Amino acid sequence: MTINPDLQGRSYPAAEVYDVGREKIREFARAVKATHPAHFDVAAAQALGHNDLVAPPTFAIIVAQRADAQLIEDPESGIDFSRVVHADQRFTHHRPIVAGDRLVAELHVDGVRAMGGGAMITTRSEIFALAPDLAPDAGADADAAGVREPVATATSSILVRGEGQ
Amino acid sequence: MSINFAELTVGQDIGSRSIAVTRTDLVKYAGASGDFNPIHWNEAFATGVGLPGVIAHGMFTMGAVVQLVTDWAGDPAAVLDFQTRFTKPVPVADTTGTPEAGAVIEVSGAIGALDAAAGTARVDLTVVSAGQKVLVKAQAVVRLA
């Protein structure tokens, strides 16, 4: 199956809220062998000026990969998950992710490029924190109203290997 | 924060460390991140798709090596931007039941650029496992002032 070139420019709206919990921050921090007290001890995080436990710098991948799954699992995309290789990754933080955040991600397909029999696909997850009770699909109007705040931009390229690659 | 921005110079070493990795670490990372791709925990599946064996998640390596930067900066939230390309897989041998590591990732960091107006430093990481560079253009921009 070949990759659908019409994917380029496609967007997937924020679908579900990811609630950032203290124990998830601690679990993720341990999993990447992080030892900084701001990931584990609320008082230590607050001493650095944060409201609550601070997530490690790559924590946003949880939210970004959930967003990417919408594309990979989209039957129209033509992507075979077992042939996907992660090629590059970037996080730009607009503000730290802390415990208690309600996060959503809008997914944008920025690039689709044929490579051999496969394709390189670049996606961008715009991750926002929502005010309590705000619905996931709140749009840019919510930014102006101050109830949705940009938190991070996660950009990822995946290589979908073609047959024989 | 203990770092004096004015005293930093481009090319300055920020330190290095060795990260020992086991299959158990990969299972923990899979659970913590939600990335359950079997190439990271199932030997038969990994070899079946042409890999030398189970390999570490690229995101495990990326997430583990940045701790050098976080600890140097003194605040995990100081990392404003972090990027890398994944160039080589990190195969992790099955050493279950022994105290041995299945792979070792060596990371070292040096200041690649300074932006006095923004109060930021770019730290360039060199990341090697089994003699091969596994990350390329691994760069973290850190706010220090």
Image (spheres, coloured by chain):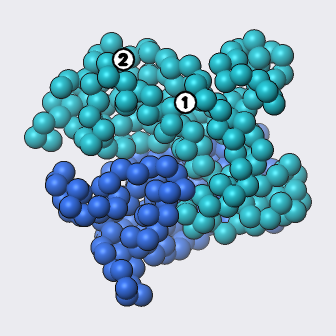
The residue that disc 1 covers is: A125
Residue beneath the point at 37% across and 30% down: A73
Could you tell me the amino acid type at mark 2?
A: Leu
Q: Position of residue B107 (x, y in %)?
A: 48, 67
Does dot 2 land on a helix, a strand or a loop? helix
Could you say which disc has been placed on residue A21 in the image? none
Tell me the quadrant of the picture where the N terminus of chain A can be found.
top left
Tell whether B134 sits left or right of A164. right
Which is more toward the observer, A37 or A130?
A130
The colour chain B appears in is blue
Residue at 60 percent of width and 58 percent of height: A28
Question: Seen in the image, is B54 located left or right of residue B27?
Answer: left
Residue at 40% over, 55% down: B57
Q: Is residue B69 above or below residue A19?
A: below
Residue beneath label 2, please?
A: A7
Where disc 1 sits, the SS reads strand
Please tell me if label 2 and label 1 are on a single chain. Answer: yes
Residue A47 sits in quarter: bottom right
Residue B92 visible at all: yes
Q: For the image shown, how many numbered marks are present on the structure?
A: 2
- Graded by Cα atoms within 10 Å as few (under 14), some (14 to 19) or many (20 or more), the crowding at tag 2 reads some
CA distance for labels 2 and 1: 15 Å
Disc 1: which chain? A
**Mark with earlier residue (2, 1):** 2
Callout 1: 10 Å neighbours few (<14), some, many (20+)?
many
Q: Quadrant of residue A149?
A: top right
Q: Disc 1 marks which amino acid? A: Ser
Can you give x and y, in whole percent of width and height, for residue A83 in the image? Answer: 25, 41
Q: Colour of chain A?
A: cyan
Residue A33, image x, y percentages: 57, 67
Q: Nearer the viewer, residue B113 or A89?
A: A89
- What residue do we see at 58% from left, 54% from top? B123
